[in-house]
Image (tube, rainbow, N blue to C red):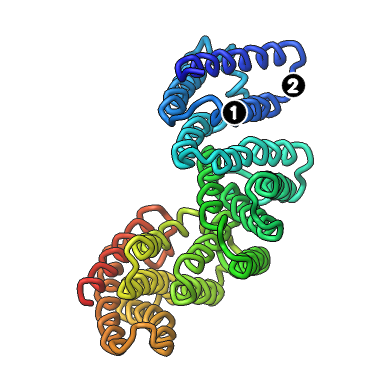
Amino acid sequence: MGPWLGIVLVCVTLAALIAGLRLYQQNFNPHPEWVRKLLHILMGLMALTFPWIFEEPWPVWVLAVAAASGLFLLKFQKVLHAGFGTVVHGVERASLGEFYFPLSIAVVFDLANGNWLMYVIPILILTLADATAALIGVRYGKLNYRSTDSVKSVEGSVAFFLVTFFSVHVPLLLFSGIDPVNSLLVAMICGILVMLFEAVAWRGLDNLFIPLGGFFLLQVYWDMPSTDLLLRAAVVMVVLFLLITVRRLTTLNHSAAIGAALVGYVSWALGGLQWLLPPLLMLIVYAALAMLAGQRESSTHRLHTVVAVSSVGLIWLFINQVWPHSEYLFPYTLCYAAQLSMIGIVRESFSHPQLSGGWYVIRGVLDGWVFLFVPLLAMHAFGDDSLRISVQALVILSLSALFFYRWQPAVRDCPDDLPRWLRQVVVAGVASLAGYALI
């Protein structure tokens, strides 16, 4: 089949699906979420045929643009929105998921580079697991938790894990030649981690997080030895256990706690113990500060807090993956230490508003330096220059903490707005760059 004939065939099929679901709506008046997810499943099943229709990525990109354009018209053109648009937008929500869906299909098709199994498995997860979780949650969800911009259910997340597990395990077992035990372990790891990706997604970004997360996890774990997979499976289970049991000791809401767990796992998986310690120690000290400040009962911090606190560190982590070098550990640790210092300043100001600003800065600097650099100094993580580097860190932390205290308004009110976290991102980024320049 020529590529243009394939494009026309897929477009006609998609139009027929929407028309058929519109007739189904008019005649049977089903729940709007059911119609929306039925379209999701049918579009996904149609996309699964692409490796046998197209040999190159460009026709899939053409289809992605065409589908996104058509969905845009259904969303924003009044006449179409009131008619065929109800198939996609019958449930009113602030989401761009319908546009991410065709985009993610094109991206994964391109990344798979002709490996049909690497394409089919992520799209199968996107097609079946996401829709099943939503429908199970709507019908049977009783145990709810707060996501970034919505309420999700434990029952839906469990359903998501189970469908993802079988969507990975069965194709790998039947078509890849992988060892059955390895297939089980890869499916379990992918199931849990992609479930967590879906839990923290907002405004329809799960349609990107699910297939891309599934693709990259498969790419990493496909050829990994059994012993390494067992270790990673054990760590994933520990992360899940800590997520369930320890969240109540912090002021993180559910999505923020899931985000923190993912940051910890990624830091360990890509960098090892030395790269896990800074975010882990920062989380432990932060939880202690929250309890001392009497704020443990209020789950106030959302996912954007975790993103802000970890963003600079994750950049250094990925730089180390591309250009590995031990010297990156210092600016990586320094950015988390700076974040902890700034958090310490805000917490101390909130807990003891009668004290002076100088005390807040000193206390914050000591929190960041003692709890993050001293443990790594004891591990000799920075080599023969550990003492010199730690002294430099103390100086940089002092300057960054003082600058933050002067820059951040209303410190004693313990602000939790976006400008505060953006300030912390900037200060932590500058501090880590200064540390890198001194190496």
Q: Residue drawn 59% across and 65% down?
A: 225
Q: Residue drawn 33% across and 82% down?
A: 362
Residue closer to the observer: 44 or 57? 57
Q: Position of residue 205 (x, y in %)?
A: 51, 41
Name the element at disc 1. Answer: loop
* Residue located farthest toward the left when viewing the structure as drawn: 437
Q: Position of residue 326 (x, y in %)?
A: 34, 75
- The residue wearing badge 1 is 49
Looking at the picture, does residue 314 appear above or below residue 11? Answer: below
Q: Position of residue 274 (x, y in %)?
A: 44, 77
Q: Quadrant of residue 370?
A: bottom left
- Mark 2 residue type: Pro
Question: In this rendering, does residue 242 appear at all?
Answer: no
Q: Residue drawn 68% across and 24% down?
A: 35
Query: In front of the other: label 2 or label 1?
Result: 1
Q: Which dot marks residue 30?
A: 2
User: Which is nearer the N-term, disc 2 or disc 1?
Assistant: 2
Mark 2, other Cα within 10 Å: few <14 / some 14–19 / many ≥20: few
Q: Position of residue 415 (x, y in %)?
A: 42, 60
* Residue located farthest toward the front when viewing the structure as drawn: 177
